[in-house]
Amino acid sequence: MGNARDIKKRMKAVGNIKRITRTMQMIATSKFAKAQQSSLATRPYTDTLFDLVAQLAEAGVGEGHPLLTEPSAEANELTLVLSADRGLCGPYNGTIVRTALKHLRESSAAGNGQIEIVGKKGASALKFNGFTDFTHHTHIGDKPAFEDVERLAARFIEMFVNGEVSAVRVVYMKYISAGRQRPEVMQLLPFSTPEVESDGSESSMQDVYEFSPDAESLLDSLLPAAVKAVLFQCFNDAVVSEHIARMVAMKAATDNAGKMGHLLKREFNRVRQTQITTELTEIISGAAALE
């Protein structure tokens, strides 16, 4: 049990930390609302592109398209890791790094291939684990613009079509809901449409499209657009998940600081009470000695 002055200093420090973490929580909550709105706004476009490509694939259109088939030349994969520039977001960066390291170590084509990273935390962690030959994108930040992502996706498409890489995979945190996010290694190229989950009902409605011009020429412009939209959705999901993780971490830190403040206040009262009792005892003992 320390003295009252030391405990008072700790109480002041804990109070300052609590104010900082509460402010960071409020900022993360505000950014989360904006990022969630952006992420949800792009999903209908992405889902519609998926639906169009799926219907074309079911009709047998696009067989042999360079973005849908594996390249004939032997080449390694390209792995894009989406991490955060800042910490204080709980297990977010650690989960992304562990997922990326597991993928790079289990797949020789990925481990020996090209690695590109978004976010300072992911770059530092991979460098610490021995992966030093990678490209670090520092211009995107936590507000990804579609133009930047579009240029990145166009370069990936060009590398894949030219046979420089056999596949392009993205390691990111997929946003499912405000209470659920999961790390995922998604195959961006060769492009494939996800399987539609059935709800068990027999009467399921499906949109019917009439394609003009013909489906073959439409697919040439539709597939690159779908790849760019999917990659942009990955960036948006990663940003939303980061803000959620930081919001939860800062709320937990604020709660812990409040509990610590109560414990220190109780300890301070006990120390102060002990000091007062000791002083009274000394005064009474001194008065008794003078009699």
Image (spheres, rainbow, N blue to C red):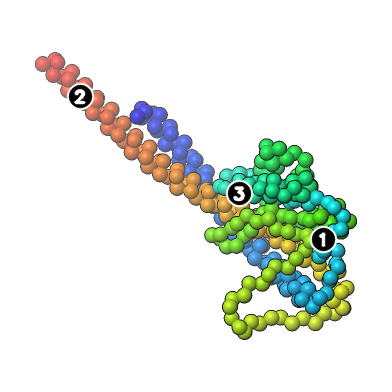
Distance from label 2 to label 1 (Cα)?
88 Å
Which circle marks residue 70 in the picture?
1
In the picture of the structure, the residue carrying the numbered disc 3 is 95
Distance from label 1 to label 3 (Cα)?
30 Å
Q: In front here: 34 or 230?
A: 230
How far across and down, in percent of the image, does residue 203 sit? 62, 84
Whether residue 190 is situated above or below residue 61 in the rendered picture:
above
The mark closer to the camera, 1 or 3, is: 1
In the picture of the structure, the residue carrying the numbered disc 2 is 281
Amino acid type at mark 2 = Thr
The mark closer to the camera, 2 or 1, is: 1
Observer able to see residue 222: yes
Whether residue 203 is situated above or below residue 174 in the rendered picture:
below
Amino acid type at mark 3 = Thr
Which circle marks residue 264 in the picture?
none
* Residue shown at the point (77%, 43%) measured from the top left: 134
Question: Which residue is situated farthest in the bottom direction here?
Answer: 203
Q: Residues within 10 Å of mark 1 (few under 14, many from 20)?
A: some
How far across and down, in percent of the image, does residue 215 sit? 84, 76
Q: Quadrant of the N terminus?
A: top left
Q: Earlier in the sequence, mark 2 or mark 1?
A: 1
Question: Which residue is situated farthest in the top direction here?
Answer: 290
Amino acid type at mark 1 = Glu
The mark closer to the camera, 3 or 2, is: 3
